[in-house]
Image (cartoon, grey):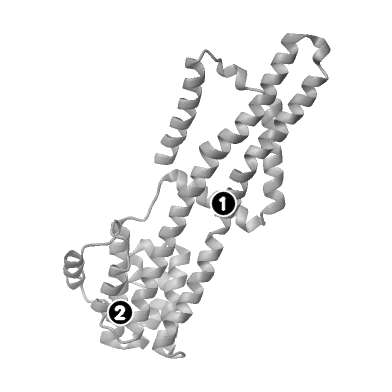
Amino acid sequence: MLIIVGGIIVLASTLGGFMIAGGKPILLLHLSEFVVILGITGGMIVIATPAHVLKEVVHKTIEALKGKSISKGDFNDLLKLLYEIFMVGRRNGLIALEEHVMDPKKSSIFQRYPVVLNHPERLEFLVNGLKPVIDGKIKPDQLADLMEAELDAKATEAEHPLHVLQLIADSLPAIGIVAAVLGIINTMSAIAEGPEAVGEKVAAALTGTLLGIFIAYGFVSPLGARLKTIVVADEEVLRCIMQAVAGFAKGLAPLTAVEVARRSLNSHVQPGGAELEAALKALAPAK
């Protein structure tokens, strides 16, 4: 919601200042300039962006518009899930985790924590981290490197939409200049029509430059910054999972492994230590 409020403020401030100075908003509406700027931008995106990245740009943009962010409560639930999983492995042996890891959708533990169950990337990362622990195929001290490699790959992939938005933001001012130059060329061919016609065409040309800069710095660049915060937050969730699973694999007690993960979080989403410990100890034993 805040991103929509911010967009309204940008638009209202621009049009409000223009109108206070005596301008009429209708003077900014030149269809030809919109066609050139939006058309070139759209074509550039098609040329530069693979289909799967374009889908991710749309997905992340919708997510940003909805204003959803990872809260302290989400991390609280994540840590509870990890603790319950680890306690099952500690009490009943690692083989007891197999039924939960192999089919998490049917797991009585995972079903209580939609923060992971309903997020395929987080679920896959946790399951992939737990499987080697159950199978015993790698040494415990090697698991952190394995999960770190997967995390790096996911982080690189998550940045692709940001690069697309950065490309758009960097290109729009120049695209606006292209629209303006086209307008000036059109103006030069209409000099014989008189000052009024020339003035109208010059205004249309200048609108092209305005639109390019306005859209780039008023909307696209801030949207890229917002998506960056979403990407960083998603990565923090995965890193929290990695810290806990790697610690448990090395033999840390479930409570200690979860505490290590908790301390890796940023302060604004980090659950309180005493409250979390009390909540974990109050959980009913998982089976």
Say which residue appears at 28% left-offset and 63% top-offset: 76
Residue at image mark 1: 57
Query: Residue 32: x, y in percent?
Result: 71, 27
Q: Give, as a three-letter code, the residue at label 1.
A: Val
Q: Is residue 251 left or right of residue 159?
A: left
Say which residue appears at 35% left-offset and 66% top-offset: 111
Q: CA distance from mark 2 to mark 1?
A: 36 Å
90 or 142, which is in the foreground? 142
Query: Residue 232: x, y in percent?
Result: 43, 59
Q: Is residue 72 left or right of residue 208?
A: left
Check residue 86 in the rendering and tell me which mark sits there, or answer none: 2
62 or 20, which is in the foreground? 20
Q: In this rendering, is residue 89 above or below 205?
A: below
Compare marks 2 and 1 and give the one earlier in the sequence: 1
Check residue 5 in the rendering and tell me which mark sits there, or answer none: none
Q: Is residue 6 in sight in this rendering?
A: yes
Say which residue appears at 43% left-offset and 61% top-offset: 234
Say which residue appears at 72% left-offset and 35% top-offset: 178
Element assignment for label 1:
helix
The quarter of the displayed image where residue 202 is located = top right
Query: Residue 59: x, y in percent?
Result: 53, 51
Element assignment for label 2:
helix
Query: Residue 136: x, y in percent?
Result: 42, 90
Q: Give, as a three-letter code, the residue at label 2.
A: Phe
Q: In this rendering, is residue 252 above or below 50?
A: below
Mark 2 or 1: in front is 1
